Amino acid sequence: MTKELKIGDIAPDFTLPTDGGGEITLSSLKGQKVVLYFYPKDDTPGCTKESCSFNENLSALNKMNAAVIGLSKCSVKKHDKFKAKYNLTFPLASAENNNV
């Protein structure tokens, strides 16, 4: 069942696999601000620019107690390559089954 969220809604909890063989659960970040950005595909011009921008500003976001998570339908294996290629230092979550 798909639920459309509106501004101000509380995001439903999820657990997803991430790069490096990990996983992330939204509720584990309770008490932090969370920047969850959705992007279509690893290693495309717009998505690369967006991801690199978050990475370049990660220190400032961390000072605001904000965690950054990138989310796409790409596989964890593709995330591993994308993250290594651009030295991204935040988790990339995979929703291959379109479950978020």
Image: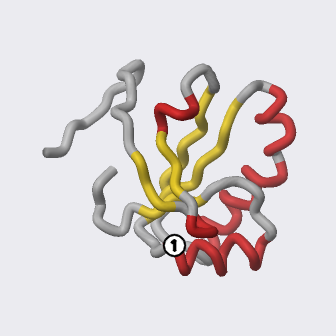
Q: Find residue 26 and report its horizontal and vertical position in percent.
A: 48, 38
* The one of 23 and 55 positioned closer to us in this rendering: 23
Q: Find residue 77 and report its horizontal and vertical position in percent.
A: 54, 79
Total numbered labels: 1
Question: In the image, 23: left or right of 66?
Answer: left
**Which residue occupies the extreme left position in the image?**
1
| Residue that appears at 74% across and 26% down | 65
- 66 up-or-down from 86: above or below: above
Q: Find residue 21 and report its horizontal and vertical position in percent.
A: 57, 68
- 70 up-or-down from 57: above or below: below
Q: Find residue 55 and report its horizontal and vertical position in percent.
A: 78, 54
| Residue that appears at 18% across and 44% down | 2
Identify residue for label 1: 76
Question: In the image, 79: left or right of 1?
Answer: right
Q: Quadrant of residue 91?
A: bottom right
Q: Quadrant of residue 22?
A: bottom right
| Residue that appears at 29% across and 55% down | 99
| Residue that appears at 46% across and 72% down | 74
Colour logic: secondary structure
* The one of 46 and 4 positioned closer to us in this rendering: 4
- 3 up-or-down from 32: above or below: below
Amino acid type of the residue tagged 1 in the rendering: Val
- 93 up-or-down from 48: above or below: above
**Quadrant assignment for the N terminus:** top left
Give the crowd class for mark 1: few <14, some 14-19, many >=20 residues within 10 Å. Answer: many
Secondary structure of residue under mark 1? helix
